[in-house]
Image (spheres, rainbow, N blue to C red):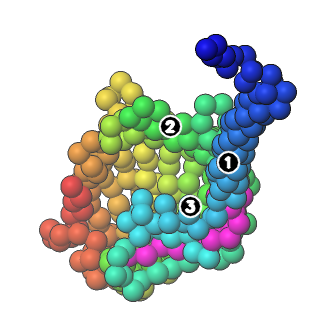
Amino acid sequence: MIRRKRSKSLWAPTVAGTGWGESTYAEMSWDKSRSAAFRWAMFGVVIGLVVALVAFAPAAWLARAVTSASNQRLLLADARGTVWNGSAVLVLTGGPDSRDASSLPGRLSWTLGLKGMGLELVARHACCLNGPVALQVKPGFGRMSVTLAPSPGWTGQWPSAWLGGLGTPWNTLQLGGAARLVSPGLTLESVQGRWRVQGRAEVELVGVSSRLATLDTLGSYVLTLSGDPAQGGVAQLRLATQEGALQLSGDGSWGPGGVRFRGEARAGTADEAALTNLLNIIGRREGARSVISIG
């Protein structure tokens, strides 16, 4: 009896004829291609969202950062616009839970952009800044530097009464006059949490007055801050009187250990009675003088 074996080759023409194998491979290839396209599309969406988030980051984010860094003593109130181009009202407060607050007139506006290896912040404030004022911020590994670019003449001028927002003793003194910043260039550098100063800045206190004195004006004064890298980043402070019935003087430093200052306030014999209350507030009385000690 002869048995016939079914040849395996009988199946091959069927598969080849129907194209089933080729169709399956095509579908698998299409699925992989579609999956890859979907992943790339999602990646593009995420990148787009990140770029949009950075480009249109609200100014309120910068306001919260300033509030946190200043321990709620400097506020950017009613912040509008974006981190890169915005405006706000500058407010000084006495810190957490303080009821004291004082704002400047008008709005501070700013633009923030890339410059070199860092950022440049250009600020404008009609009431208090002498034209555009530029701050250059350069981050690094464990360090950050902030440089105040030199400007012709004075950089900024603020009413002394603004300090009343900081609370005691400024709200008691209720100062009048103006505080003017003059600087040929100043750099503050933070290295592992410690600040170093390079350059020079002067704060001129012009036509100062106080409700604690019966005199119309107390005088004009200059507080100088100067730093030299050769001094290990420790900045020197010096307070001197330019003119006035109230004589202020003192020296100190600002370094890793914080601010240390020793000075004194005196009144001429003819004005001592008019300045007694003020001298009692400024520092510790020692006869005709009042000793000022910080740190």
Residue 255 locus on image (x, y percent) = 30, 42
Marks 2/3 in contact by CB < 8 Å: the verdict is no
Residue labelled with disc 2: 139
Q: In this view, does 52 lie above or below 213?
A: above
Q: Is residue 92 magenta?
A: yes
Query: Closer to the camera: disc 3 or disc 1?
Result: 1
Q: Nearer the viewer, residue 156 or 140?
A: 140
Residue 125 locus on image (x, y percent) = 69, 64
Residue drawn where x is 46% and y is 38% of the image: 144
Q: In which quarter of the image is residue 291?
A: bottom left
Name the side, left or right, on which 207 lies relative to 116: left
Q: Is residue 113 magenta?
A: no
Q: Is mark 1 on a helix, strand or loop?
A: helix
Q: How far apart are marks 2 and 3 (CA)?
A: 17 Å
The stretch in magenta equals 79-94
Q: What element carries label 2?
A: strand
- Amino acid type indicated by mark 3: Leu
* Identity of the residue furthest to the left in this view: 286
Residue labelled with disc 3: 62
Q: Nearer the viewer, residue 113 or 154?
A: 113
Q: Residues within 10 Å of mark 3 (few under 14, many from 20)?
A: some
